[in-house]
Image (spheres, rainbow, N blue to C red):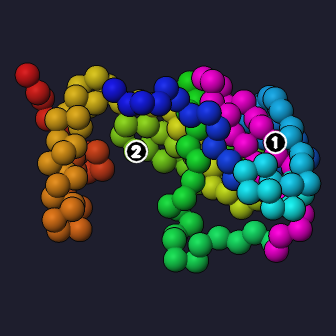
Amino acid sequence: MPITNGIHHVAYRCKDAKETVLWYQKYLNLPFVLAIAENQVPSTKEPDPYMHIFLDVGGGNILAFFELPTKPEMGRDDNTPLWTQHLALHVDSMEKMLAVKDKLTADGIDVLGPVDHTLFQSIYFFDPNGHRIELAYQTSTPAMDKALDAVKWQMLDEWAATKRAPNHARWIHDGTPPPVLD
């Protein structure tokens, strides 16, 4: 059992707190639940004004952002590909996911997908701060989940030893059916 019981919040930096709140409300209907602003960082006592905003992503999970007006403009890690760092949010239907895609594209926002990952369908887009967002609709079956659970440690051990993609779950991407487990 983990010692934790969920995510309190995940925090990212934003360029403009108000723009960020309005964008997430418009496209994802996320409720704005809290704003905290200080001129001094509580933990470090560093004099640094900030606006900290909190959005409800459902399921007791909170997405937060910091606007830091005295700091240089935010950048990204040039050594990490754009597709790697992202926030994936669960949606409960393809229809909802496609409705968000339609709303984004109608406003000129580029959307990749839907992409079929066998276990889920996804769309990808960037928020106004440059953060990559994924909406994912789960499509896996209990048999698929069981097959992946059965090989997770073998895959991790093989990866640790070789740094090459193991073939234990190749069926996810090659279109073959998952193995049948007793």
Q: Which mark is residue 53?
A: 1
Q: Tell me which segment is drawn in magenta.
A: 51-72
Q: Is residue 53 magenta?
A: yes
Camera-side residue: 2 or 164? 2
Q: Amino acid at mark 1?
A: Ile
Work out whether residue 108 can be spotted.
Answer: no
Could you tell me how far apart the alpha carbons at marks 2 and 1 are, in whole angstroms?
Answer: 32 Å
Residue drawn at x 89%, y 45% is 37
Horizontal and vertical percent for residue 13?
74, 57
Residue extending furthest left?
182
**What secondary structure is the magenta-colored segment mainly?**
strand
Q: Is residue 127 magenta?
A: no
Camera-side residue: 2 or 135? 2
Q: Residues within 10 Å of mark 1 (few under 14, many from 20)?
A: many
Residue located beneath label 2 in the image: 117
In the visual, does 119 lie left or right of 56? left
Give the structural element (helix, strand or loop) at label 2: loop
